[in-house]
Image: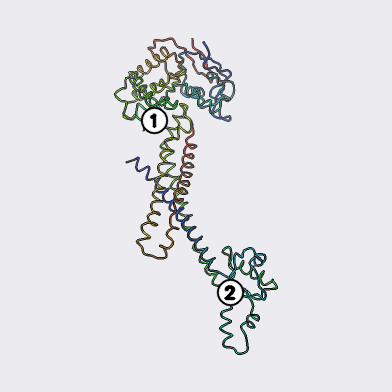
Amino acid sequence: MANIISASHLTLGYSNNDADIIKNANFKIKKGDFVFITGPSGSGKSTLLRSFYGQLKPKSGNLLVGAQDMNKISKKKLQELRTYFGIIFQDYKLINEWSVAKNVVLPLIIAGYNADVQETQAKRLLKHVKLSEHADRLPLELSGGEQQRIGVARALAKNPTLILADEPTGNLDEYSSNVIWDLMENANEQLDATVVVVTHRIPNIFSIPYRHLIIENKGIYEVH
Amino acid sequence: MKYIKEHIMFIFPMLAILLGIESFIVFDRMSANYEQGLKEDYSMLVLADTPVTLPEFKQLDRRISSIDTIEKHSIVKEMAQGMNGISAEDIMQSLPHFYTIHLGSFLDSQEIEQIKGVLLASKAIKKVETFGKSHNSSYNLFIFIRVVLWTFVGFMTFTSLFLVIKQMEIWQFAHKERMQVMEIFGASTMLRSGILFKRAIIDAVIATLLTSGLFAFLRFVWIKQSHIDLLMQREALLFAYKDIAILGGIAMLIVVTAVMMVVIGSKESKL
C-alpha cells in the first residue's frame, strides 16, 4: 500500500522562537490505515493533525501528505489537497446559520456540484447518520451528539481519501461516541478511506484492525 | 428582522457617503456653470492707438479668448452733428480704438493684473481697465462656498466611512468562523466571500438607487413645484443620468474594499 502521510525528522512548533511541540518524528501512514494518535493533554496531538491539513508548516524535517511536500506546498495546491480530506473537529465547527442539510454538503458546494446532486447527497448522508428528519433545522437546535453526526456526514460527503478527526468524541456521551465510532469504522471499511483520529482514549469496543501512534516527550512512537 | 437590520446598518452609512458625493458632484457642476457665467460676464476694456486683431492679442497673452471691437461710429456721428466745423471723420481719426477682451478661463486678480501688465507693455495699447475689485469679490465668494461644501462633504464621508468600517467589523465577527471552516475544506477566496459580496453589492445598489432617486426627484418634481426661477433655469445641473453610473461605481469600490478587508481579516488561524 502507498503511503498517504509520511514524516521524516518532523519538527513542529508555532514559531521559531517557541519550544518545539513535536521533535524529530518519523512515521508513515498507509492508504486504508485506521490510526489512533494518543497522548496526554498538550502533547501536540492536535498540532500534528493541523500539520496534516496544512494549517501549520513543519519547522524542520519533511512531511508528505499525498504527493505534496507540506513545506513547499502552494496556497492553490493546499486548497486542492484539502478537497480530498474530510475533517472532523471536537467542537464540530458547523456553520450555524446554515441548515443541517447545507452543512452536510459543504464539500460538494466547494467542489461546485449542482443543487440536485447536493440535495440527493444530503438525503443519503443524513439517512446514513440517522438525521433525515433534521435536514431543515439549524445545527444549534440539535444535541452535541447530533451535531457531531452532522460533522461526520460532512466529512464523508465527497468520499474523502483521508479523514482527519480531532477528538471527535471528546464532548459526547457514551452512546453518541459509539455512533461516531461506528460511522468512522464504516468509512474506513466501505469507502476505503484512511482515517487518522486524535483522541485521549481509544474506545473499548472497536471491531476493525487499527494502528496506534503515541506522542511522548515530543516524539511519536508506534504501539504494537 | 436581523437580516433587515444588517442591511440597514450598511445602507445608511453608504447612503450618507453617496449623498455627500452627489452633493459634491452637483456643486461641482453648479460651480462650473457659475464660473462660466463669471467668465462670460467678465471683460477688460482696452484702448489702443492702432487697430489690434485677435491673433495679435493672443500673441500677447494666450488666455485671451475673444475680443469685441466697440463700435464708435454712430456715437461719433451724433457728437459731430452738434459741433460746427468738425466732421465725424476727424473725430474718428483722433479717437483711439476700443476693445472689450474676454478671457478663456476664470482668473484671480493677480493673474488679471499680470495680463494688464503684458497688454500695457505693447506699444499699441495705451490703457487697460480691469474692473479688478468686483471680479475679486465674486471670486472670493465662489472660493468660500466651495471650501465650505468640501469641508462638509469631507466630514460626512469620513464619518460615514467610519460607520461602514464598524459594520464591516460586525460582519467580520459574524462571518469569520464560516469563512475559516470553508477555507479548511478547500474553498477559494471567491467562494468564501461570495455571500458577503452578494449582500454588500445589493446594499450598494440600493444606496445608489436611493441617492439617485432623491436627486432625480429634486430635479424632475420638486424644482418644478418650487417655482424658483433661479433653480428652474438650472434644473439640469441638479441631476444627470451619468451620476447613477458614477455613484454606482463609487459604491461598488467601497463595498469591494470593505468586503476584501473582512476576507483578509478572516484568514485561517488556529481553529
- Amino acid of disc 2: Ile
Q: Quadrant of residue B233?
A: bottom left
Front of the two marks 1 and 2: 2
Mark carried by residue B133: none
The front one of A137 and A122 is A122
- Mark 1 and mark 2: span between their CA atoms? 82 Å
Q: Which residue is mark 2?
A: B70
Q: Which residue is mark 1?
A: A95
Crowding near the residue tagged with mark 1, few <14, some 14–19, many ≥20 C-alpha atoms within 10 Å:
many
**Element on which disc 2 rests:** loop
Q: Residue furthest right?
A: B123
Q: Quadrant of residue B52?
A: bottom right
Q: Residue furthest left?
A: A133
The front one of B213 and A51 is B213
Same-chain status of marks 1 and 2? no
Relative to B258, say whether B18 is above or below: below
Q: Chain of mark 2?
A: B
Residue located 34% across and 23% down the image? A145
Residue located 38% across and 16% down the image? A181
Q: Position of residue B119 (x, y in %)?
A: 66, 70
- Amino acid of disc 1: Ile
Q: Position of residue B57 (x, y in %)?
A: 65, 67
Residue located 43% across and 41% down the image? B201
- The answer to whether any part of residue A127 appears in the image is yes
**Element on which disc 1 rests:** loop
The front one of A219 and B168 is B168
- Number of numbered discs on residues: 2
Q: Position of residue B114 (x, y in %)?
A: 64, 68
Q: Residue furthest bottom?
A: B84
The front one of A112 and B243 is B243
On screen, residue A193 versus residue A120, left or right, reads right
Residues at circles 1 and 2 in contact by the CB criterion of under 8 Å: no
